[in-house]
Structures are given as C-alpha cells and as structure tokens.
Amino acid sequence: MTDLISMTIAEARNGLANKSFTSLELTDAHLAAIEAARALNAFVLETPDKARAMARAIDAKIAKGEGGPLAGIPLGIKDLFATKDVRTTACSKILGNFVPPYESTVTSQLWRDGAVMLGKLNNDEFAMGSSNETSCFGPVVNPWRREGSNTTLVPGGSSGGSASAVAALLCMGATATDTGGSIRQPAAFTATVGVKPTYGRCSRWGIVAFASSLDQAGPIARTVRDSAILMRSMAGHDPKDTTSVDRAVPDYEAAIGKSVKGMKIGIPREYRLDGMPAEVEKLWTEGAAWLKAAGAELVEISLPHTKYALPAYYIVAPAEASSNLARYDGVRYGLRVPGGSIGEMYENTRAEGFGDEVRRRVMIGTYVLSAGYYDAYYLRAQKVRTLIKKDFEDCFAKGVNAILTPATPSAAFGIGEKGGADPVEMYLNDIFTVTVNMAGLPGIAVPAGKDTQGLPLGLQLIGRPFDEETLFSLGEVVEQAAGRFTPERWW
Ligand code: GLN
C-alpha cells in the first residue's frame, strides 16, 4: 500500500477522492506514527478515539460524494486552540485540566470542511518563547539533527509541537499561532512551510490570548500548496471577533503556479545584520536569484525603524499579556492553590501556575503599563509601532509587491543552549519576524536550504495586507528552486 504518512495534503486529497484508501486508514497510519514518535514530545494529548470517529464519519460522507475541501485529512491542533470537550491548556499548569465547552472558530472551520483531529500539540507556555522549552509538558524535540551528532535540538517556538509533528510526518498539517514569529520561526527550524496571515484574516475567537493586537492563527504544512489549502479553511470573517475582517476568502491554491513576472521584490538593507552567519546571507542571495530567474524584479529598500522593532515588541506584547493573563485567578479555570484570604489564593495560584517566562512577561507588562512609566514605555512603543508600519507602507506605495528576508538569524539550536543566562539571547531569534506582527502584515516562511551542519534554513516573504496570494505564488517559486527537505528518521 502507498506510504500513507509521507504524502502531501494535496496527494491525500486525490487518494481519498479516488478511493485508493479511506480516511480511517490514513488516520490509523498517523496514529501509529504518533505512538512511535513519543520521544519528540510533539503531542501533549492524543485523541485516537475521537480521530477514528471523525474519520469514520467523513468516510461515510465521502462514500456519498459529500465531504468538504479537507475531507478526511488528519491534522494536529496547537494546544492554544480551544477544542470542545477536549483538554486545552496552552501548555500552562494554570489551566490544569481545563476542558472548554466551546470550539475555536478556526478549528470549527477545519471540522466543517472535513478534517480529522489527531490530538493537541505542544507549545511554549501561553505561546511565550522561541524554542518550545517553556511548556509545562517539557520541551519538544526537533526531528532534525546536526550531521553526525545526536544532540537534541529545539524545533523553535512557540508552535514547536506543530512544526515538529508536521516535519516528522505525524500529521499532514497543523494549526499554529504567531504573535512575533511563532509560526514562521519553527517552520524555518524544521523545513516546513508556515504562514502568518494578515491581522484580522483568521478569527482569534477561542484561541488563548497572548497579545491580542499581534496574535494571528495560521497553518504549518509540508508544502506551499498544502499551506494554501489549509489557509482557505482557517480564514474568514467571524462576528465573534471584532478584529476579524469581513472580506471574501480567495481560493489561495489558485495562486500556486501563477506567474511572478514583473513583480517588484524588496530586499531591505536593515535586515543585513552584523555578524549574520555567511550561510544565511548566502541563502538570502540565492533566494533573490531564484525570484529574479522567475521574472521578478529585485529592488533594494529601506525599513529604517527595523532596529526598534524587537524592543518595542517586548513592551507591547508583555503589556497585552499582563492584561490578558489577569483572568487566571484560580476561580475561573483549572488550577487553584488555596490561601488564607482571596488575595492570597490569587497570589498562590498565579505563583504556582505560571512558569518563569510567563511571570517575567507579566511583571514587565505590568511595569510598562503602570502610571509612572506608561508614557515612557508603552505609549512610546506604540508610536514606534506606527513608524514600523509606515516603513512598510512607504515601500508598498512605491510599487513593492513583497519583501524577501531570511526567516531566522540561525538554524535550530540545542535544547538548553540559549537564553539561560540572558533572556534577550532567546528574544533575538525573532529579529526578522516581529516587524511583520507589529505592522499586521502577512508573512510566509519557506524552506530554502541547509546550513553547513545539515540543518534547514528558511526564507521569509512579507506581503501587502490581505495579499497572501502573492506570498503563495512567490513561495512556490522558492520551493520549486530549493526542493523539499525531510529529516532522516531516528526516533
Ligand atoms: N518568541 C516570541 C515571544 O516569545 C514570539 C512568540 C509568538 O509568536 N507567540 O514572544
């Protein structure tokens, strides 16, 4: 029988339609792969019974010629998405065994379109992190290893479980979220494709909130086409999220293979960092050459406020987090640690329920929002944010269709290797991705090559608001030129 787990979503869709195999067979193959890959710690909850029940139901529909665009496709869901009657924790002790009585809009659209849920995927606690080491369920392991070494590497974060599971063929695609890079950075670390849609494109309803003005849901998949297929189901207007935009969802897949001839691609000079590894620089040049060969025109552009993006992000994001996380008080969700008074109960619950990184963010956020410091930090960061957004608008106004940058400043690093002494070392991972969230723009990370140690590296394309289609067209050009990369199985 065909290898059921290494197919793309597009291939599986054909196989299911031709009746070459059933969704139940496809689902069982993935459940077996998940069971054999527990060493990766990608799933924090496996839901085999639910998966098989969903697969059987969709098989019955397919037999009748029904079934939506994702009919029978097994997916993994980041544990930040509320799933009805299925434990949802954001990988924080404070949510304990919280079982939501409702389904997030994005996941409900996936089930509407026929997808099958395999289980919940690991992530950094409340999506705060770049390595998936802050999860209360422990770190996720990257299926990639350095050549000739068995050091375990991080898959990136915060959507580390999503990226690792997709790369290791445990699910055909996964949901993820991106506040400062959490879809694109782990995609780059695992040779998967990650899309951060325009702010407002996917509903945030039912997704555990981190920084509401930056959070966006998006897919991680193994090909650009698969990510386009998933996006179509995930996107759409939702009256339950007031920031969700009422705009028709295009057929993203139709953008694949469209000519990019004549498109203007910006190469921002500020992204050429001092001390950037030569191989990242080389990859970037190579990526530009591939787009040029496909008929695009390259132009050097300037995004002068880039250097302020990371510091401003680390004011805005913690400020919003400190206010969003105020709801975890020991009364409404999960964990409660008793105390002598209600105040003490709040304090004990929060002290015990939140991990170190989350506590750090809550403290920074509360500080920058406090009366004496609001103007100096929070208000100033908001002004910087406007300038960052304007940098991009100025380039787009000059006819730039998309911007090409590296996705990350390095390849995946070892578990425990970064951020121990200085958290800023970890924050620097997002140097190329946070600007996009600050400006609310869409971005895609596409696997583009390997470093000297054999680890994958990705390129990022940044688009105009609501022009994800151009990113899919350009992303496909990069994918065609670079080829696809699969880790060797060792687990
Ligand atoms: N690494 C960044 C942070 O820790 C971004 C996380 C994310 O996008 N959720 O805040």
Image (tube, helix red, strand yellow):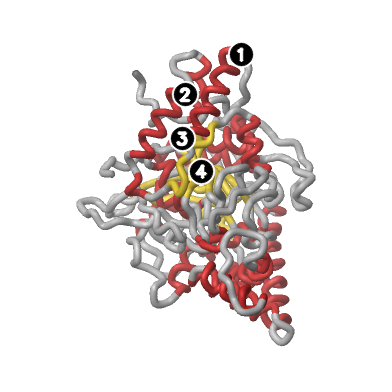
Judge from the rendering whether residue 315 lies leftward or rightward of residue 163; answer left or right.
Answer: right
Q: Earlier in the sequence, mark 4 or mark 3?
A: 3
Q: Look at the picture and state if 26 lies above or below 206.
A: above
Beta carbon of the mark 3 residue lies under 8 A of ligand 1? no
Q: Residue at x 45, y 30 (%)?
A: 8
Of residues 335 and 23, the one nearer the viewer is 335
Tell me the kind of residue under disc 4. Ile
Q: Which residue is mark 4?
A: 220
Nearer to us: label 4 or label 3: 3
Q: Can you give x and y, in whole percent of width and height, for residue 422 in the image?
A: 43, 76
Q: Which residue is mark 2?
A: 24
Q: Residue at x 32, y 39 (%)?
A: 36
Q: Which residue is mark 3?
A: 48
Return the mark for residue 65: 1
Q: Earlier in the sequence, mark 4 or mark 1?
A: 1
Pick the quarter of the image with the C terminus: top left
Mark 1: give few (<14), some (14-19) or many (20+) Cα within 10 Å.
few
Mark 2: give few (<14), some (14-19) or many (20+) Cα within 10 Å.
many
Task: Report how far apart the C-alphas of labels 1 and 2 lie in the structure.
Answer: 17 Å
Q: Can you give x and y, in whole percent of width and height, for residue 97 in the image?
A: 54, 54
Q: Earlier in the sequence, mark 1 or mark 2?
A: 2
Q: Residue lying at the far bottom in this picture: please name it.
A: 372
Tell me the kind of residue under disc 3. Pro
